[in-house]
Image: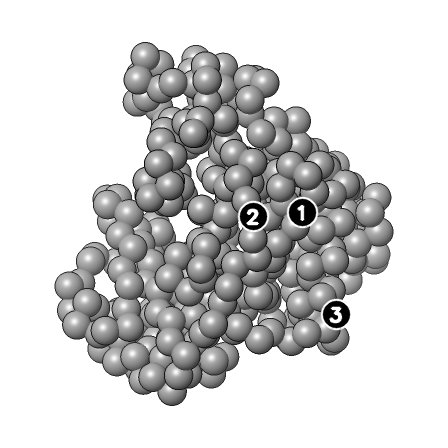
Amino acid sequence: MKPVCVLGNGQLGRMLRQAGEPLGIAVYPVGLDAEPESVPFHHAVITAEIERWPETALTRELAEHAAFVNRDIFPRLADRLTQKQLLDSLQLPTAPWQLLASAQEWPGVFSRLGELAIVKRRVGGYDGRGQWRLRHDTAATLPQECYGECIVEQGIAFSGEVSMVGARSTDGHCVFYPLTHNLHEEGILRASVALPQPDARMQQQAETMLAAIMNALGYVGVMAMECFIVGDRLLINELAPRVHNSGHWTQNGASISQFELHLRAILDLPLPKPVIDAPSVMINLIGTDVNSAWLALPLVHLHWYDKEVRPGRKVGHLNLTHSDRTQLQHTLQSLVPLLPEAYHSGLQWAQATL
């Protein structure tokens, strides 16, 4: 089995490495401290865990390597401008948007897009960073450096947020997980809920859209598509050409996790449709110290990233899965006294969504 080198060595790279071990796949996350002689990249398959990886001589070489799967697709999707242009070219639904080139455009922006404008950096910016919610009276607060480097979208009144995580093989075969319902607070994913029998119409709509994107690009591997629910239809918010936070529940709630599925796809291994038998919940641990009391609850699976705990930083997640939704709801309620107050709204949302 060929080894896999991952551009970036955060938690996603760590979980790709963990997923490779049972299959005998050696995975090498590559960050700033990677020594070129310890990374067998000459005979490896190369992938990425993040849109912007650390810049070193080694990562530059990997990024240009012929064995970097999706090498030429990655920068196209990492830039929100070219990502939106792709979706428009495929006639897939998104929020109305435009490039924001200068401050003189604001009157036209509000005239066209409405009273709430969402500004996003074209490259970088995640977990609520690099994004601004602006109205007529606050548009002047946008830093001057953003003009030409950002897109602006219409603020959408949505009833919910979902994501579709799927994978495509080298021969064009696509498989998908059930739609994942997501709760974001201040731009950060707080909780996800996946049901084994999602809304059939919405599931089909999401699968059709994501398949169209992956097929148009000739993409290989796992891709995530975040969407807004607006009435009975989905609007695509953003794409992630990699494994994704909202797919973490698959580690314990699916027959094949998103991390294993990605490795299978890029190594041209069999890609069966993952089996999901029970509802699952994922709770992101953000700026919170580890608490061994979580492990007293039998349905809780702790995934700790072994990172320094800092405010606003993702340091781990909890997965819960069980065929009995009542037991899941009871366990979520039992977590309330074991987590800071900032988590309580997310735990309540997850109980209500099950």
Residue hosting label 2 = 271
Residue 103, image x, y percentages: 72, 41
* Among the two numbered marks 2 and 1 on one chain, the one whose residue lies closer to the N terminus: 1
Asked where in the image residue 241 lies, by quadrant, the reply is top right
Kindly tell me whether residue 305 is visible in this rendering: yes
Asked whether disc 2 touches disc 1, contact meaning CB atoms under 8 Å apart, the reply is yes
Quadrant in the picture for the N terminus? top left
Count residues near mark 3 (Cα–Cα under 10 Å), then give few for <14, some for 14-19, many for 20+.
Answer: some
Mark 1 residue type: His
SS of the residue under disc 1? loop
**Is residue 340 positioned above or below 269 on the image?**
below
Asked whether disc 3 touches disc 1, contact meaning CB atoms under 8 Å apart, the reply is no
Residue hosting label 3 = 233
**Is residue 269 positioned above or below 210 on the image?**
above
**Is residue 38 positioned above or below 189 on the image?**
above
Residue hosting label 1 = 173
Q: Which residue is drawn at 71% across and 66% down?
A: 204
Q: How is the image coloured?
A: one colour
SS of the residue under disc 2? loop
Q: How far apart are marks 2 and 3 (CA)?
A: 29 Å
Judge by depth and name the residue closer to the eye, 267 or 47. 267
Q: Which residue is drawn at 33% across and 44% down?
A: 22
Residue 261, image x, y percentages: 50, 47
Mark 2 residue type: Leu
